[in-house]
Amino acid sequence: MKKKSIRFLACSDIHSNLKLVSKITKQIDFSKIDFVLFNGDLSNNKDDFAKILKPFIDNKKEIFMIPGNWDSKSAVENLKKFYDVKLIGNKPIIFGENELGIFGTNYLEIGQFGKYEEEIFENMVDNFNAVKECRFKIQMNHIPAVDTMLGDASPYPFVQGSEPLKQFLDSCEFCPDVCFVGHIHETSGLEEIVNKTKVINLAETFKVFEFNFENNTLLEVK
């Protein structure tokens, strides 16, 4: 029998914060969660992976991730090899019969996965095209868009929003339904609408969402 809905946990910028992991463990009923999304900056130290991922692995939850600026290439390879973490950048995931598509990019403007802005934008487009037939689309991007409330909130001049994401979201050709971001900790937990996309900042926090296959809606589970 086809499931009527799926639930997932989404979070970003854990940065080896085991207190946050403990809070997630205490507040989340993992028996009702189908999978987990990490939106980058999982750890400041690759030796922390076992402690950070223990509750998710113990509860046999599939983990999908995009890299953040703190995530090194060697760390990401370790996550894939030893913890079965799956990168959705360049390999989007689709649920149902093209009902829900989740896509992202493995690249960003800073860190070891840094690329030129043009390359990042082109990568976003390529990954969007893999889910464009889906009726509901979720984008994962570690850095919020520049010239937005979520992207311009940092007091530090070297912490800025993403030009490629702004270009992508401003284009009427794409317009994902929801975009998960992180990176800018000052706007943790806040939301805004950019063009037609609801953008949710998950930095240093977590949310549970339920997607309903019957009416193609995504709701936050309180």
Image (spheres, helix red, strand yellow):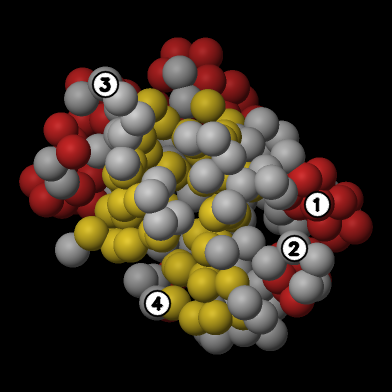
Specify which label sits upstream in the sequence, 3 or 1: 3
For the N terminus, the quadrant is top left
Calculate the distance from the C-alpha at mark 1 to the C-alpha at mark 4.
26 Å
Coordinates of residue 106 in the picture (x, y in percent): 68, 41
Question: In this figure, which residue is indicated by the disc labeled 1?
Answer: 125
Calculate the distance from the C-alpha at mark 3 to the C-alpha at mark 1.
32 Å
Q: Which residue appears at 20% of the width and 25% of the height?
A: 59
Query: In the current view of this chain or complex, which residue is farthest to the left?
Result: 26
Q: Which residue appears at 58% of the width and 52% of the height?
A: 135
Q: Are marks 4 and 3 in contact (CB under 8 Å)?
A: no
**On screen, residue 12 above or below 84:** below
- The quarter holding residue 13 reads bottom left
Specify which label sits upstream in the sequence, 1 or 4: 1
Label 2 or label 3, whichever lies nearer to me, is 2
Residue 190's label in the rendered image is 4
The amino acid marked with disc number 1 is Val
Calculate the distance from the C-alpha at mark 4 to the C-alpha at mark 2.
23 Å
Residue 174's label in the rendered image is 2
Q: Nearer the viewer, residue 133 or 156?
A: 133
The amino acid marked with disc number 3 is Lys
Please rate how many residues cluster around mark 2, counting C-alpha atoms within 10 Å: few if below 14, some from 14 to 19, many from 20: some
Specify which label sits upstream in the sequence, 1 or 2: 1
Q: Are marks 1 and 2 in contact (CB under 8 Å)?
A: yes
